[in-house]
Image (spheres, grey):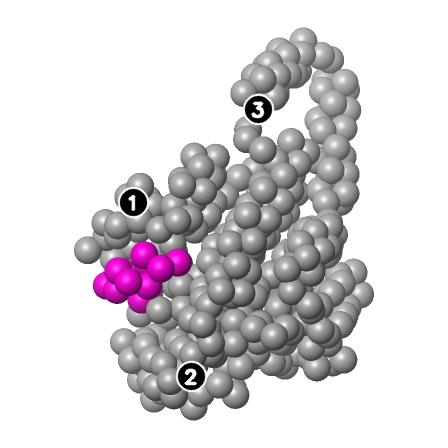
Amino acid sequence: MGFSVSSFSSSSSSSSSSFSLQHTLPPLLKRTASSNRRVCIQSCFSSVSYHKFVDFALDETSLHTHLLSSPLQEKYSSMKSKDGKGVLNMLSFQADKIRLLRSMTIETETMQVLDFTVFPKAEYDVPIFCANFFSTAKTNIVVLDLNPLHDIINQDDYKEKYFKSLMPLGLKYAEHFPWGGKLTSESITFFSPIVIWTKFTSSPQNYDILYSAFRDYYKPWMQVWLELIATAVKETDGYQISHNLEAQHRYLTWRAETDPGQGVLKKLIGDTLAKDLLRSFLFNGVDELGSKTFNDYFPHYHGEEGTLNKKGGIAGKSFENRPWDASGKFLGQ
């Protein structure tokens, strides 16, 4: 589904009429109209739920592979925020060629969050499916991608293998979702040329577009991803399996340390539970798949006395615009 020009025109016209009306209304009616708009925005936001996104993704995935409940499900299913006003819901599954498919939704009075990821088993080098949505009554931040397991900036063979055929689809949605702003040179290595990284204001129309885009986006991408999984040759070479395992561990180590949602989780459930949720559920495997530390993988972040140098990610080049051309060639070097 694409964006409707007529819907944008209608919205713009309605906004213009509302503006003119405000300048002709008496003060009391102005305040009432303004209050009603705030109530409408909050009501529309409250009606948004990412559970239907997860339900759609699981139904679509089940059409292609048999999902089994993960052992993580027993411990990580749901929890309430410290103030009792927020709820976190978690689901986790595994399959023949999927190490972990997991989702987390967060619902509070002021925000909605979706974190949905699919990790392949180490015998397969397919990308990691990643969907991260953050919504408040005013704004939305969206990341949707097939995160490359191996280097695609300097290794054309991996990029050609998994992303060349997906470029038309990525370009289609790049037209609908503008680039969301600066990403550091370190972060960009974990994204593919077809990544959707965007921000937009909250509105009923945008929420409808987001859900339609998620369905349109997830269905063909997951079909392609599952077809890749289904046709991917199971690696038997010990070196390549170790290479895949280290690549996934490096990804998990980066995400567990730098994930921007850490602050939100700590505020909602406290430092101890947030750390456990990050390392044992969201980025499960960071403590089991390898022994290297964050400083081993990213030594330029190493600060004094073993501390993390937060400026490490700012020192390099940042990208204000999409750093790939239409063919998927990286333009940032």
Task: Point out the stretch of residues depicted in magenta.
Answer: 151-162
Identify the secondary structure beneath mark 1: loop
Q: What element carries label 2?
A: loop
Q: Name the residue under label 3.
A: 4
The residue that mark 1 highlights is: 327
Task: Please name the residue shown 73% across and 74% down the image.
Answer: 69
Q: Earlier in the sequence, mark 3 or mark 1?
A: 3
Residue drawn at (50%, 43%) of the image? 199
Q: Where is residue 329 in the image (x, y as percent from the top left)?
A: 26, 50
Give x and y (percent) for residue 10.
61, 16
Q: Nearer the viewer, mark 2 or mark 1?
A: 2
**Where 132 sits versus 216, above or below?**
below
Mark 3 or mark 2: whose residue is earlier in sequence: 3
Is 94 rendered above or below residue 209? below
Is-magenta flag for residue 268?
A: no
Give the Cα separation between the discs numbered 3 and 1.
27 Å
